[in-house]
Image (cartoon, grey):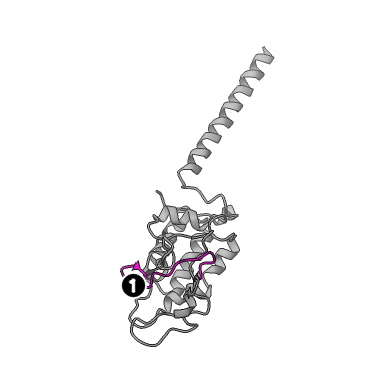
């Protein structure tokens, strides 16, 4: 009788563990949980606050100042309507252009004076060919997942992702030159939302 009771108890425990595993798998599969790539303390996780913060981040990343340098093809985008760059420069292996048509041939270290002239930065470039970091056409869910994946974000961990908000080339979006619109948030607002999204768990909005 005792052995029968032990077997029943063991069976119940196994079934309970299996059920928990299946629920956890389903929760991960739909993208509602914190990213597998981010080591965020449980006490800081807040899926609602994290997703709300990312929606603000997403509005900036999808603005022309960001998306134009994160195209799905190998030609950068241009203008407020994000059309293909008129000069048709190519990404190149390192993201800095191909052959004689290098990004920094036209994009100088500083903005070129004049209406609709090329904005500047000393290291103007697209993401490299082996790490394209495409923004164009991505949903908020897809982009959030991509941003926290080290295999797609240049090997960045939590700390490096936070620091990336102050990257010099990122900040040029808020100094775009004459005739170009700035992103919908200030850089300070963007940075605050970016950090909150990550520190609250880097949750992806629902697909």
- Asked whether 172 or 108 is in front, the reply is 108
Q: Position of residue 177 (x, y in %)?
A: 39, 82
Please check the rendered image and state whether residue 8 is part of the magenta-colored stretch, yes or no.
no
* Farthest-out residue, top: 1
Residue 203 visible within the image? no
Residue 34: give x, y in percent of width and height: 52, 51
- The residue nearer to you, when weighing 145 against 116, is 116
Classify 10 Å Cα crowding around label 1: few (below 14), some (14-19), many (20 and above).
some
Which residue is identified by label 1? 79
- Looking at the figure, which quarter contains the N terminus? top right
Overall secondary structure of the magenta section: loop
Drawn side of residue 152 relative to residue 83, left or right = right
- Give 112 or 75, whichever is nearer the viewer: 75
Q: In this rendering, is residue 196 above or below 149?
A: below
Residue 118 visible in image? yes
Residue at x 52%, y 34% (from the top left corner): 22
Helix, strand, or loop for circle 1? Answer: loop
Q: Which residues are magenta?
A: 81-97
Residue at left offset 43%, top offset 83%: 111
**Magenta stretch holds residue 85:** yes
């Amino acid at each position: 009788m005792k052995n029968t009771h032990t077997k029943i108890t063991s069976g119940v425990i196994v079934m309970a563990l299996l059920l928990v595993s299946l629920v956890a798998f389903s929760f991960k599969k739909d993208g509602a949980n914190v990213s597998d790539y981010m080591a965020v303390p449980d006490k800081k996780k807040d899926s609602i606050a994290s997703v709300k913060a990312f929606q603000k981040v997403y509005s900036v990343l999808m603005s022309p100042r960001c998306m134009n340098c994160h195209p799905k093809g190998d030609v950068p985008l241009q203008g407020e309507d994000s059309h293909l760059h008129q000069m048709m420069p190519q990404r190149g292996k390192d993201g800095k252009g191909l052959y004689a048509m290098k990004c920094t041939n036209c994009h100088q270290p500083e903005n070129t004076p004049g209406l609709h002239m090329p904005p500047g930065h000393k290291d103007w470039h697209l993401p490299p060919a082996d790490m394209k970091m495409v923004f164009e056409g991505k949903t908020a869910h897809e982009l959030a997942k991509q941003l926290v994946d080290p295999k797609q974000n240049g090997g960045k961990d939590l700390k490096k992702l936070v620091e990336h908000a102050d990257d010099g080339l990122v900040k040029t979006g808020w100094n775009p030159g004459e005739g170009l619109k700035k992103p919908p948030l200030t850089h300070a607002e963007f940075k605050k939302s970016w950090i909150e999204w990550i520190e609250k768990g880097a949750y992806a909005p629902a697909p």
